[in-house]
Image (spheres, grey):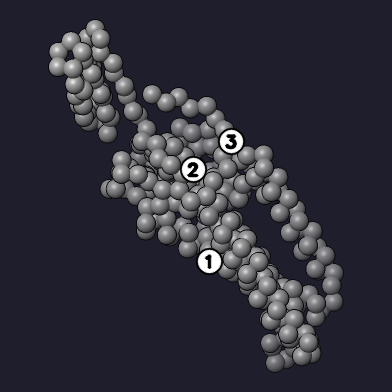
Amino acid sequence: MLSYTTSSTASTGTGATTFLSPRRRTHIPRAKGQRISLDLIGRVPKGGSTKNASTAGSSTSLFTSASGQSAACPFSKSLAAFGCFWGSFGVIYILSKAIFRVLPIALEPLYASTSLTLSSLQWSLYALSCAFFAYAEGYKGFHKKFAPLVVKRSFTLVVGTSQGNNPINYLLAPLYSMGLWGATSKRLKVSWGVTLGVAAVVAVVKRLPAAPRCILDAGVVVGLTIGSASIFYHFVSSLMTGKLPDVDACLPQVSRKQN
């Protein structure tokens, strides 16, 4: 809703507010001594909406909360919805592929027909690996940091913003949501460092003997499973509550004109 606020010192000395339909432009004559202010975008702090945010459509308020720009027309709303779904669930798809790739190796000692037999010490390390990766990777890494970032950034793809006007960001929304580009320099270093580090660890683990590799892969499966579930949780929670994760989306600084 467009809000025009006028103030006059010549007549009443008090402000008056006129609300206009967003589909109609109405010319308001400006008398001498009057000041007209136009608030086009209801900006809200990161992580949630305010009382001025629309409660009729939670998705629109979420987009505004994340990017500072409302998805006004049906076309931009469709693109924004596509960006957030593909951005969040695309990352879940990437993690799921990694899970199913190493899952058979992690479960190999549990098969009755397997030739891999673990000792009591190795079974203890197997359980310890699952517990360690569940906390360090699944909870601390994914649930508290990475998953909220992915969901928050996936909602920033709104037409009218620098990131929303780039079609590559929609096509590769999962990678954009992971912070591999279109982010602050610090976020880029962290995201690329983690990605390359994980790739190096995977290459090393593949060359380990069967038992140590099985133990490590079991922990990785647990951590990635918690991470995938965490992204799904934050995404659904945002839609249900109308409030995005309270984390920084790590968007590059851009100049914005505010009236």
Dot label at residue 156: 2
Q: Quadrant of residue 127?
A: bottom right
Q: Quadrant of residue 63?
A: top left
Tag 3: residue type?
A: Pro
Counting from the top left corner in percent of width and height, residue 44 is at 40, 40
- How packed mark 2 is, by other alpha carbons closer than 10 Å (few <14, some 14-19, many 20 or more), is many
- Asked if 90 appears above or below 39 in the picture, the reply is below
Dot label at residue 152: none
Dot label at residue 229: 1
Q: Earlier in the sequence, mark 2 or mark 3?
A: 2
Q: Quadrant where the C terminus lies?
A: top left
Which residue shows up at 56% across the image and 59% down it? 144
Tag 2: residue type?
A: Thr
- How packed mark 3 is, by other alpha carbons closer than 10 Å (few <14, some 14-19, many 20 or more), is some
* Label 2 to label 3: alpha-carbon separation: 12 Å
Q: Is residue 88 left or right of residue 205?
A: left
Residue underneath mark 3 = 252
Q: Are marks 2 and 1 in contact (CB under 8 Å)?
A: no
Q: Earlier in the sequence, mark 2 or mark 1?
A: 2
Residue 219 visible at all: yes
- How packed mark 1 is, by other alpha carbons closer than 10 Å (few <14, some 14-19, many 20 or more), is some
Tag 1: residue type?
A: Ala
Q: Quadrant where the N terminus lies?
A: top left
Which residue shows up at 24% across the image and 26% down it? 24
Counting from the top left corner in percent of width and height, residue 98 is at 66, 65
Which residue shows up at 59% across the image and 46% down it? 176
- Asked if 41 appears above or below 15 in the picture, the reply is below
Which residue shows up at 59% across the image and 66% down it? 139
Between 158 and 172, the one nearer to me in the picture: 158
